[in-house]
Image (cartoon, helix red, strand yellow):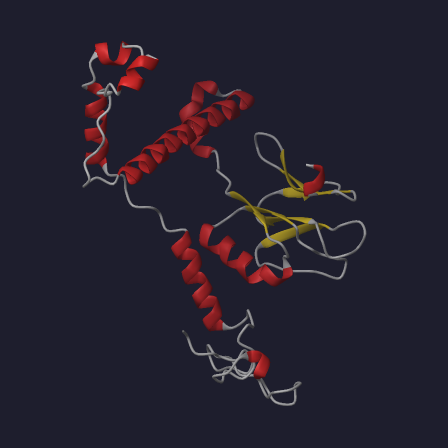
Amino acid sequence: MRPYRCLKCAESHPTKNCPKVGRTTPATCALCLGPHPSNYKGCEVYKEILVTKIQKRTTLRPQTNLNAITQLQDQTKNTTKTDTEKPKYYSDVVKGTPDKSFNLPSQQENYQQITYNRIEEIFIKQSEKIDMILQQMILQHDGSLDNSSQQTDKVRKLKIATWNINGLSPNKSEVDILLKIHDLDILLISETHFTNSNHVNISNYNIYTTNHPDGTAHGGTAVVIRSSIEHYELPQFKTEHIQATSVSVQDKNGNFNVSSVYCLQSIK
């Protein structure tokens, strides 16, 4: 069991038993020994630990085991036509007739990893097809199908992410790190828990918020968009159960709108 570290004074005892009372003496951080509590999110050591954790979560999975997948595909190709077309009867199952149409991989192969990699490969191919369709739609809208190769190079892809943050103010440092690591253009946030007295600033980004109409800290949405992108805010939408923040992005091929919407779970 790890030894206790007090959040107030960094000594080896539980925080609830700390003799330090009030703010008569400065706090001591157990991470950097600075004059602040150990749970202060502005601590430099805490930020370094947080960056390391996020980078580990976003690390790409191991590359596909091509040899194992090739072996599995060869087994499927070698299946005889008779075996694949042979109907499965209830009597065959009861008699325990073995099904030779599929051979399980050997114990040395990681079958779960093979399955995951095959699914991942399918998703990548599907995303490439979707990108291709979107590019064609943009070119059709612009009326320049004859110069498709040149127009495709000019299309700029935006990086957009969503996050149910459960409180924007206490998680502002995590938002800064997420925008920086993934180089996001737009971040759609729900459950900001903002009131009219809450404000945050992020360098090189504009923030638009919609608070709950009753003025208390719950619900709410926000759109964080890169300042260099041409855009303007659309009218807010807010009721007792639904809040939405919308922004219109101006593009040479036409405008498009993005919205961050929060809907109370009980009415979904």
Q: Nearer the viewer, residue 98 or 177?
A: 98
Left or right, 219 with reference to 160 = right
Question: Is 66 situated above or below 6?
Answer: above
Residue 108 placed where, x, y %? 18, 41
Which image quarter is the N terminus in? bottom left
- Is residue 121 visible to the viewer in this orientation of the structure? yes
Hey, which residue is sitting farthest right in the picture?
214
Residue 244 placed where, x, y %? 70, 42
Q: Nearer the viewer, residue 228 or 245?
A: 245
Residue at figure coordinates x 47%, y 23% from the top left: 136
Residue 215 placed where, x, y %? 79, 55
Left or right, 43 with reference to 116 = right
Residue 165 placed where, x, y %? 60, 53
- Is residue 88 visible to the viewer in this orientation of the structure? no
Question: Is 230 situated above or below 23?
Answer: above
Which image quarter is the C terminus in? top right
